[in-house]
Amino acid sequence: MIGSLDLNQKEVVIVGAGISGLLIGYHLKKLGFKITIHEASGRTGGLIETTVTPYGLVEKAAHSLLVGEELKRFLTELNIELLPVNEDSKARFILRGKKMRRMPLSFFEIIQTLIHFFSKPSNPIDLNSASLQEWGKTYLGAAPTEYLLGPFVSGVFACTPAELNTAISFPKLLPNDPKQSLFRFLRSKKSAKKSRTQMMVPRDGMQSLVTSLSEALKDDIILHSSIQSLSELKSPNIILTTPTQSLASLIESADPVSANLLRAVSYSPLVTVTVHYHRSHFRKAPPSGVGVLIPRNEGFRILGVLFNSSAFNNRVQSKDYVSMTVMLGGTTDPEALQLTDSAVQAIINDELERLIGTTQNLTHLCRTNWSHAIPIYSLALAQAQKSLKEGFCSKPGLVVFNNYSKDVSIRGMIETLIKD
């Protein structure tokens, strides 16, 4: 969250009823604020949406949460039943050499990684401007950067480590002294003991989170209400939860510097495709685990595959079918958004045959295109955040809250609200 509320005034207007607008609206209503939420579209939830098909649940964006004790209490309060990862399906894989591996590094590469971890950097990085790729090569080495960081970043941000600014994407990874070894830095950190988190899903899909929040705020949300100018909002407290481009337009007259910086912030394009195969359409047993991420040098167009029905219960209508979500696109392949459905289906059939041994075409496909899926936590975003703090949001009563204001994840946004 960027900015602060005028706590002497208990009235708040929120622009945007995506997941961030719903979360902060719900939180403030509990604290006794009078809430009004303006949403330009005809539905709430933004990117978060679950559909029910004859084959099972389909998530159009986020499909799970990392849940700690605080988040579990929050979701219990909303009467959302959570399902953990199935005990026999907790494995996570990375593809290397055309094989799915739980540890993609060789013994020699692990030794080299440990040497980097315990050694002082030979070429210290600039802590403010360094990319995650520079951080990885400095503190871990080339192999883990390529085969661990790369797939992880591709799976979370749909971009590459070179595009992320370490200081805002993973600030807890940065030593105070650039000449310090990562081992010494982590050993010296004094932080409160944190509760363990586990990967979980709402039993009825992520839509249940949107539905519960929307129901709690049903008297406070105005749909089809497009705000074009801040002058339309008569409130001592204004919270803007729109994407960066919309935010830039709204604050243009009040803070043109921040508006220009916001327009420079990039988003990753993403295609999410949930597919269903009949169990008989595999050369051997369907894959067991959470999913697999695929480095860009492995010759696959797919970024990764989530094994939905293997990892979690209640994902398919019949045990005769297997549900998986395939991710395409990202900053390395933006052209994927222009592919026809038949072309996407051909890619998936071909690459899943090579990856996990499917033998026939998929039974069912549900595709969603996101031209602006995930904000890239780049140096450009860092500059925009700093400008907003010093400019538009410097006065109490003006707040920006979204997945680009501090944390890209739903869990991170919820924990920010709980702690603040």
Image (cartoon, helix red, strand yellow):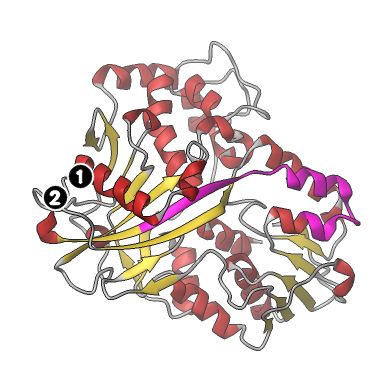
Is 261 contained in the magenta span? Answer: yes
Residue 254 is tagged as: none
Which residue appears at 45% of the width and 73% of the height?
207
Can you see residue 193?
no
Disc 2 and disc 1: Cα gap in Å? 6 Å
Q: Position of residue 62 (x, y in %)?
A: 45, 60
| Along the viewing direction, whichever of 177 and 388 lies nearer the viewer | 388
Which residue appears at 25% of the width and 38% of the height?
102
Question: Considering the image in quadrants, where does the C terminus appear?
Answer: bottom right
Is residue 310 placed above or below 32 in the rendered structure? above
Is residue 176 placed above or below 29 in the rendered structure? above
Quadrant of the image occupied by residue 19: bottom right
Residue type marked 2: Thr
Q: Mark 2 points at which residue?
A: 359
Q: Mark 1 points at which residue?
A: 353
Query: Dot 2, how many residues are within 10 Å of its Cα: few (below 14), some (14-19), or many (20+)?
Result: some
